[in-house]
Amino acid sequence: MCFSTVTLRAPTDADGYSLHNLVARCQPLDTNSVYCNLLQCTDFADTAIAAENSQGQLVGFISGYRPPSRQDCIFIWQVAVDSSMRGQGLALKMLLSLIERVAPLGVRYIETTISPSNLPSQSLFLKAFKQLNIPHTTDTLFSSQKHFSGVHEDEVLYRAGPIITQSKNNQVNS
């Protein structure tokens, strides 16, 4: 499939069931209920991005939210890319487009958690941080033993920023 036929857009309620199916195809992502996916596509549409192919099929999705106590942050919850689109840079394009969309809302930091064995996600976020020219830190947020009774890997928090944006008059804002 040609990457140029993909449209990036804000999700709508019509994407909820398709998102559920996309995540199910993207193992080892955690699946949620269709209801949760509907909420991601409606209540969290401002902090999510959908990728649709020319046939109208959902082939990529990033869900995120702004934590209530840290409104200057976007927490990226999940990144899903259909197998037909992998290796074409879609995840990075979605992530950078989403950051560009939320930065004017006062978002200055990006957070996500990644398991130590998830090398593709680590690579994606490190590429994004490098392209955005922002520093990052890592720290274990949820411990395998303490939070998952040893049945799930640690979840390592990646925090990057501050995001520096260019305003229309070419002044740098941070």
Image (spheres, grey):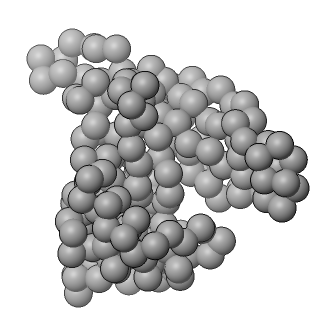
70 left or right of 58? Answer: right
Q: Position of residue 16 (x, y in %)?
A: 31, 73
Residue 89 shows in the view: no
Q: Nearer the viewer, residue 22 or 131?
A: 22
Could you say where residue 28 lies in the image, as x and y percent from the top left? 65, 71
Quarter of the rendering occupied by the C terminus: top left
Note whether residue 64 is visible. yes
**59 shown above or below 43:** below
Which residue corresponds to the image point at 50% horizontal and 69% vertical from the top-left?
Answer: 32
Q: Nearer the viewer, residue 166 or 103?
A: 103
Farthest-out residue, left? 169
From the viewer's perspective, tell me whether residue 50 is left or right of residue 151. Answer: left
| Vertical relation: 97 (above or below) 42 | above
Residue at 62% x, 36% y is 158
Image coordinates for residue 114, horizontal then vertical, percent: 66, 49
Q: Nearer the viewer, residue 146 or 99?
A: 146
> Relative to 82, is 105 on the left or the right?
left
Which residue is at 45% across, 53% downward? Answer: 92
Residue at 72% x, 52% y: name it.
115
Q: Is residue 41 above or below residue 46?
A: below
Q: Nearer the viewer, residue 38 or 48?
A: 38
Residue 105, located in which quarter of the rendered image? top left
